[in-house]
Amino acid sequence: MRFFRNLTTIATMLFAVALPAIAATHARRGPTSHLFVKKKLKSGFRPAGAIAPQRTTQIQTALIRAGYLTGEPTGAWDTPTQQALQKLQGDNGWQTKLTPDSRALIKLGLGPGSTPPETATADTSASQESSN
């Protein structure tokens, strides 16, 4: 009986000593560690809520066509683009956050099932060339 009690005590002591050593060798990196961030930046990672440059160009083209934005589409989600989108959404009584409202995208002709402006232009010119 005394042998088992000593064996249990020894096993408990070994476990207590070994556990911190095991935990120290298996460091876990969280999503904010520099290695995680570096890896994500290399892979073309966009933060949540970021709009892809191609989609931004489509939105800018539609805003220019609707008269809310001037100039050429740049593909950058910049301040003039954000202000133009806010104005469009505010004029229609929708939320004026910096993210596009689905109703605003539909109004601009960029909703589900619609053809993006660049594609529509290319399709129209291709069909006109083939008919000539």
Image (cartoon, rainbow, N blue to C red):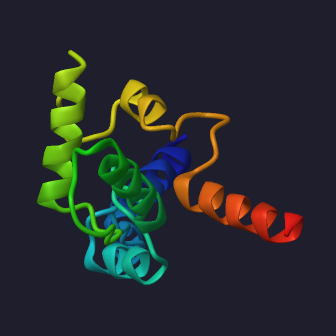
**In the orientation shown, which residue stands out farthest toward the right?**
131
Q: Is residue 95 visible?
A: no
Residue 25 quadrant? bottom left
* Residue drawn 18% across the image and 23% down it: 91
**At which x and y percent is residue 10?**
43, 59
Task: Name the one closer to the observer, 128 or 35.
Answer: 128
Compared across the picture, whether 79 is left or right of 2 comes to left
Q: Residue at x 15, y 35 (%)?
A: 87
Q: Residue furthest top?
A: 93
Position of 85 relative to 95 (above/below): below
Give above or below for 12 relative to 125: above
Q: Nearer the viewer, residue 125 or 38?
A: 125
Can you give x and y, in whole percent of width and height, for residue 125 in the image?
69, 66
Based on the displayed image, in which of its 4 quarters is residue 18 positioned?
Answer: bottom left
In percent of the image, x 51 and y 37: which residue is there?
Answer: 109
Residue depicted at x 87% and y 69%:
130
| Residue 117 on image: x %, y % | 54, 54
Q: Position of residue 5 (x, y in %)?
A: 47, 44
**Residue in front for this viewpoint, 96 or 4:** 96
Would you say residue 91 is visible in this rendering?
yes
| Residue 17 picture quarter | bottom left
